[in-house]
Image (cartoon, grey):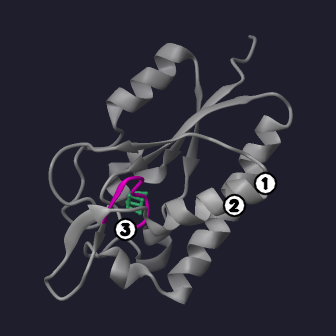
Amino acid sequence: MRRSKQIFVLHHCLLNQNARAKGLAKRRGVVEEIVEEAIRNGWGIYQIPCPELRFLGMEREPMSKTRYDTEEFRVICKEIAREVAEDLRRFVEVGYEIKGIAGVEGSPSCGVNLTHIGEGGEEKLVEGEGILVEEIKKALAKNGIRINYYGIKLEEGRDC
Ligand code: SF4
């Protein structure tokens, strides 16, 4: 079978809503409509690891970017970003097309245009990128790769 040589990159929970913070899953598992688009178009899917899962595990409560933005969490995001950018470079340098990267709007880690800031009950949705998205963009630039980012907003309400 001939490969499509086309890859779509998804932040982790678009393929696995089980990874989300408590109470935030918006699907039982996969976000079907995104996967269906990839299947229809013959794209492979590359899944970015979930940084919050690595940092706080499965019992975590929803938190803001303000609270996540620590040196420790940045280290995890930088490491994931480095691995992802190097993997994507390996595809690009042999002629594969990266169709885009889909992040999760509102997330303190994976928001593309929207993220949550604040603490102590004063959290709010604002324009801005999540911490992992910031680090991935820096790592892609370091590897000389430009890829379009898309923000997926599944429905109204809190995202991570
Ligand atoms: S949006 Fe939240 S749950 Fe989804 S991959 Fe990013 S950090 Fe993990």
Q: Earlier in the sequence, mark 2 or mark 3?
A: 3
**67 sits left or right of 137 in the view:** left
Amino acid at dot 2: Ala
Where in the figure is residue 38, as x and y percent of width and height?
49, 24
Residue at (33, 52) in percent of width and height: 105
Q: Quadrant of residue 94?
A: top right
Amino acid at dot 1: Asn
**Cα distance between the residues tagged 2 and 3:** 18 Å
The residue furthest top is: 1
Residue at (78, 54) in percent of width and height: 143
Residue receiving disc 3: 108
Q: Quadrant of residue 81?
A: bottom right
Tags 2 and 1 touching, CB below 8 Å: yes
**79 sits left or right of 142 in the view:** left
Where in the figure is residue 101, as x and y percent of width and height?
53, 42
Tags 1 and 3 touching, CB below 8 Å: no
Could you tell me which secondary element the residue under label 1 belongs to?
loop
Residues in magenta, as a range: 109-115
Residue receiving disc 1: 143
Image quarter of the N terminus? top right
Is 24 in front, or is 116? Answer: 116
Could you tell me which secondary element the residue under label 2 belongs to?
helix
Where in the figure is residue 29, as x and y percent of width and height?
32, 43
| Residue labelled 3 has its Cβ within 8 Å of some atom of ligand 1 | yes
Quarter of image, ligand 1: bottom left
Q: Does the magenta run of residues contain 110? A: yes
Residue receiving disc 2: 139
Whether residue 160 can be seen here: no
Our reading of the magenta stretch's main secondary structure is: loop
